[in-house]
Amino acid sequence: MNNAMIGFIVGSVLKIEGILLLGPCAAALWYRENAGWYYLCVAVFCMLVGWLMTRRAPEDHVFYLKEGCVSTALSWLVLSFFGGLPMYISHQIPSFIDAMFEAASGFTTTGATILSDVEGIAHATQLWRSMTHWIGGMGILVFLLAIIPLSGGSNMNIMRAESPGPSVGKLVPKVRHTARILYLIYIGLTALELIFLLCGGMSLFEAVNHSMATAGTGGFGVRNDSFASYSPYLQWVATVFMILFGINFNMYYFLVFRQFRKAFGMEEVRNYLLVVLAGIVFVFCCIYPQYGVADGARHAAFQVSSIISTTGFSTANFDAWPQAARAMLVLLMFIGACAGSTAGGLKVSRVGIAIKTMKKELTAYLHPKSIKKIQYEGKPVEHEVVRSINVYFITFLILFAGSVLLISFNGYGMETNLSAVAATINNVGPGLDKVGPTTNFGHFSVFSKCVLIFDMIAGRLELFPLLMLFHPTIWKEAASSSRLGRRLKKKNLQ
Amino acid sequence: MSSKKDKQGLKIIIVGAGNVGSTLVEQLAHEGHDITIIDIVARKIQAITDNYDVMGIIGNGASYSVLMEAGIEQADLMIAVTEADELNLLCCTVAKRVGRCAAIARVRMPDYSKEVQYLQEQLGLALVINPEMETAKEAARILAMPTALEVMSFAHGQAEMIKLAIPEGNGLAGMTIAEMAKKLPVSALVCAVERKGEVFIPSGSFCLESGDTLSFAAPRRNIRVFMDTFGFKSRRVRDTLIVGGSKASYYLAQELLHAGIAVKIIEQNRNRCEELSVLLPKAVIINGDGTDEALLKEEGIERADSFVPLTGIDEVNIILTLYAKKISDAKVITKINRMNFKSVVNSLELGSVIYPRYITAEAIVAYVRARSESRNNSIETLYHLFDHRVEAIEFVVDESSEVTGRPLMEMRQQMKKELLIAFINRNGHIIIPGGSDTIEVGDTVMIVTKHTGLQKLTDILN
């Protein structure tokens, strides 16, 4: 284990977080709020610690997948801790675990909140919550890759650990350039949404918050009723952009470079849009007696895109909708959006390959000697990929079941427990019943909140990087290489 | 670091992820180029993309759609180094039709290698490389100078750079570079010295010790004088025993026979033996197992002047050279294709070691570096010395710049440390430069330096 390099990466992440924390400081300055001081303190502290950790660049740049996973997982834990700290020390969120929950929910783009009155908190905190979505959406380590040069192929190991999806493809040969392109697309789309929202008459502060929250497919709003009190135009804008941010960013890259055939030939994107369409039609059929055609279509489209892109905004209390519509929404939570987007969930490509594997198994029953290689995006899928997807499903299931069991000690009903875990592990936000769109997660016990925080981070990092931290070998290796380092240092001193 | 890395690299497509392909990826990625590698075997691509920051594509590199996916339209250079010559040529042909890139192909079959000139011109290739031929040439150069560990040729063979180990009790031990130069009747320059694993670019006051390995550059005819002055025996090799009848063996045999050295080749495959006997009528071809101790003794390994195992298996080559060193005092050359354990290989005292994949990579890296510089300051030859820690680069000076027309003495202050100008080649005349010499337009200049990655001559200044 290359401890020095892991420390260097975590330190760099802290430095960036310190700089980002200046954002809420500026908002506090503008609105003359005291909370700004607390943000400033934490910002300075982060930058100081980050600077201390990155003072000397490590000599050994060798970096394998395990180091990539460990540094990603540690970075996210550190990120959530320092992200929640200012909310806690400024007494905006009086309980420590609640502040951690809020920050983790922000960075993992879940959008599940413990606040019952969002309008009552400082503007600085509101802005910070949205910013965490934006940073967490594309990933802070991907950002790191875009700005600091790491030698060799090792940086691919970081990208692989942080990017959503079963396999990570590069757009251009160098990781650094790929990361830059992704961020440019991300910034471009966010700015576009901002303009559309401003045109609809939303105030600048709210538009900035909402476009960042949509871009990261997060779901924190600035109003207690989320999107319900905005005009239909603004709701439609949000609907479209939620769908757009769930699309694999490679498609935008192809569009920019006018490779239209490649862009529109992407199987995953096509499947995603089909599922969205089917979901909207299904939900619309269930709710139109209640709302009528125009409102029904709007609510159905908004809610389906909000759930499948794992954003979690709401325009209506979908918890009160007919059972079929509620069931559909929960199912959509699991599918999630495309790999290579900012969304959570299982990802359309994983589900697609899993369905094809199932079909293959059926064929094998009919023709036991038949040979068929699964194809996706027009290319044969290697056995290794299929295997890793199967394992992903199993691991997901075990974590899901375990979490449901652990939070059931609260004494809530099955519907609450199941949907709370589904909403957090898929990074969606609101669930059903006691965690529905009109309520929040504040009433859970401290222990349950810890479990849900774990679920959110595990879901965002696609399970394995976080689970790696629980493998004893990782700690043994880290300890033995730090012992080795000390011995070498002693030798050099002599 | 960042200024060097930020420079826009060339967009290079490499087809074939074998030995040479992966070495090229390693070296070109290190120099900051944008590389896409294509191979039909997914496993190979996976291994390379795991280790290097490059893009991998699985598919046939000669197919139009695969090349389009790799971005051939924007590529600057296409390098085809697959197993098959025909495929390499096809890749380059397709690439040239689709994109506007330069193309380099590896062609190693003797049938085609005679027609390299024709192929290069007709297909418009930038470079045709033949690692087997280059390996053979390098082996032949070493056999012509058996005391040397390595012989590198510069300025179209006018100058050479020789690597020697200083044995116990040699006249050079305990002598400084300046004293050595005084004692030497002709001019020669010590460019680099390796001592206990560390490399130095020596100044005049540097004192040599026995056990050091030194590299010196000199005009070709002065080399024998240098050897004689300091008591290095420079007997000629009269006969050679080669194990393995590969392409490299054929090329080497041809070179040696041409120089009047008797050649004996041991090859296991009877059909190949018959082919070789037709191709090389003057050589003695033995059909048998080259790893059989009795056969080697029968064929006189104890009395042989030189012994070159050229089998495809590195381990066999190493064992055979170790064996030959033990039972005879033949000059031995070890060819290592694949292995990476350089520190172990170095400690085995295998004598001269040749790495074909580095030879190929050096030629291509030299070409790429010359291209990535927009100005016409091109690189004639490039060699890596002492495990890539030192580079010897020959630049062509074809326009005036801040380094031309100025006495070297005057520039010394501005020049980088750990860098020296080994010689200046003016119209085929090799000058070992002193303080008053100047670099002029039309010269070629050889630089030896520990600063790897120089792209143009003016990079020698700070």
Image (spheres, rainbow, N blue to C red):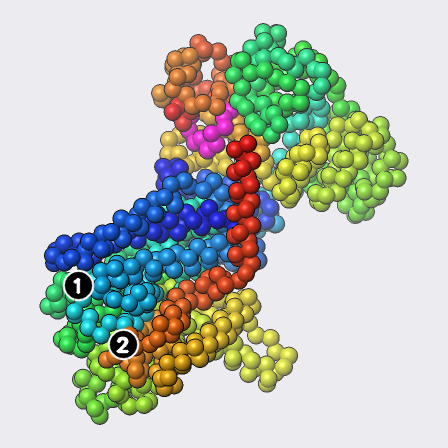
Amino acid type, label 2: Asn
Based on the displayed image, in which of its 4 quarters is residue A107 positioned? bottom left
Three-letter amino acid code at the position of disc 1: Ala
Q: Is residue A94 above or below residue B123?
A: below
Q: Report x, y in % for residue A438.
A: 23, 80
Using the image, name the chain to which the residue with label 1 belongs.
A
Per the rendered image, the range of residues in magenta is B448-458
Residue B351 vs residue B75, the one in the foreground? B351
| SS assignment for the magenta stretch, majority | loop
Left or right: residue B332 versus residue B161 is right
Q: Position of residue A94 (x, y in %)?
A: 25, 66
Q: Quadrant of residue B208?
A: top right
Q: Determine which of the numbered discs, if any, sits on residue A194 in the image.
A: none
Q: Is residue A49 visible?
A: yes
Please say whether residue B35 is one of the residues in the magenta stretch.
no
Callout 2: helix, strand or loop? loop
Residue at left 18%, top 89%?
Answer: A292
Badge 1 element? loop
Q: Label 1 belongs to which residue? A: A122
Instruction: List the residue tagged with mark 2.
Output: A440
The percent position of residue B191, horizontal first and vertical second, equals 55, 21
